[in-house]
Amino acid sequence: MSESKRRPLLKVGLTGGIGSGKSSLARMLQIRGAETIDADAIARTCTDAKGAAMPSIAQIFGPDFLTADGALDRQRMREHVFARPEARQTLEGIVHPLVSAEIGRRTLASSASCLVFDVPLLVESPRWRFQLDLVLVVDCTPETQKRRVQIRSGWDHATTESVMRSQSPRATRLAAADLVVFNDGNDIAELEQSAQWLANRFGL
Ligand code: ATP
């Protein structure tokens, strides 16, 4: 590596419950010069048709879990692993190392001074913590989460609540945070202000 190539200095894990505003804040930090890495998007790529995880998934779970074009049948797999922790572990054992490897590749290739890892289930996955300099949690009330997801995705409150129950409780997420952005308002300009404050703090 050349002497002049700048190395990432700050690795930030960005997390929050569904509808909290993670993606919005990630975009705002990206505009301000951070490089963002979306762990879920990488996982989806691994399980698309011809994705790196698909040969192992096909071999271990069988063709019933593949769509016609060879991608992961996400709905079917979600239902399968829902009440089968060992199947979930097997799936994660295939996908997580591939995601980690891809994140490692992107981290090495990056010349940004701040990398923001957008990881919805960061608190639920302890393996993440040691790769990060700090954990940034976007927080809001459960009522705000439900309202936003209803507007954005058209989900009813019961559906949103079931996703919320599958995520860490708010208190657990907050306890894992080094920094918290309280994003409970209905004004995106307020979140912009927080993003600017963070950008200054991250040296962007
Ligand atoms: P998910 O986990 O479901 O992907 P997320 O945490 O990434 O959600 P966003 O997609 O950023 O959340 O935000 C959810 C919705 O709420 C979006 O439609 C976004 O525009 C809106 N939103 C977020 N923060 C605010 C705010 N401060 N004011 C108004 N709308 C907001």
Image (tube, grey):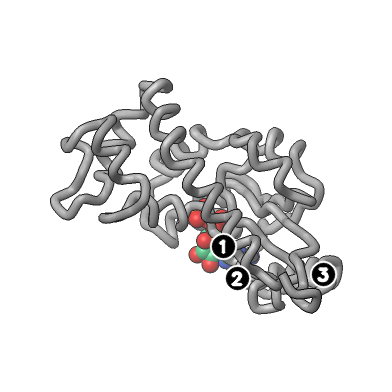
Horizontal placement of 25 versus 76: left or right? right
Secondary structure at numbered mark 1: helix
Compared with 83, 153 (above or below) is: below
The alpha-carbon separation of the residues under discs 2 and 3 comes to 15 Å
Secondary structure at numbered mark 3: helix
Q: Which amino acid type is marked by label 1? A: Ser
Label 1 lies in ligand 1 vicinity (Cβ under 8 Å): yes
Residue 151 place in picture, x, y as percent = 44, 61
Label 2 lies in ligand 1 vicinity (Cβ under 8 Å): yes
For disc 2, the marked residue is 27
Compared with 131, 198 (above or below) is: below
Rendering quadrant holding ligand 1: bottom right
Label 3 lies in ligand 1 vicinity (Cβ under 8 Å): no
Classed neighbour count for the residue bearing mark 2: other residues with Cα under 10 Å, few (<14), some (14–19), many (≥20): some
Residue 5 place in picture, x, y as percent = 75, 75
Q: Which amino acid type is marked by label 3? A: Trp
- Mark 2 and 3 residues: CB-CB less than 8 Å, in contact? no
Classed neighbour count for the residue bearing mark 1: other residues with Cα under 10 Å, few (<14), some (14–19), many (≥20): some
- Mark 2 and 1 residues: CB-CB less than 8 Å, in contact? yes
- Which of the two residues, 161 or 197, is positioned nearer the viewer here? 197
Compared with 72, 78 (above or below) is: above
Secondary structure at numbered mark 2: helix
Q: Earlier in the sequence, mark 1 or mark 3?
A: 1
Q: Going 36% across and 22% down the picture, which residue do you hit?
A: 83
Residue 2 place in picture, x, y as percent = 74, 74
- Which of the two residues, 47 or 2, is positioned nearer the viewer here? 2
For disc 1, the marked residue is 23
Q: Quadrant of the N terminus?
A: bottom right
Horizontal placement of 168 versus 155: left or right? right
- Which of the two residues, 85 or 2, is positioned nearer the viewer here? 2
Q: Which mark is residue 197?
A: 3
- Residue 40 appears in the figure: yes
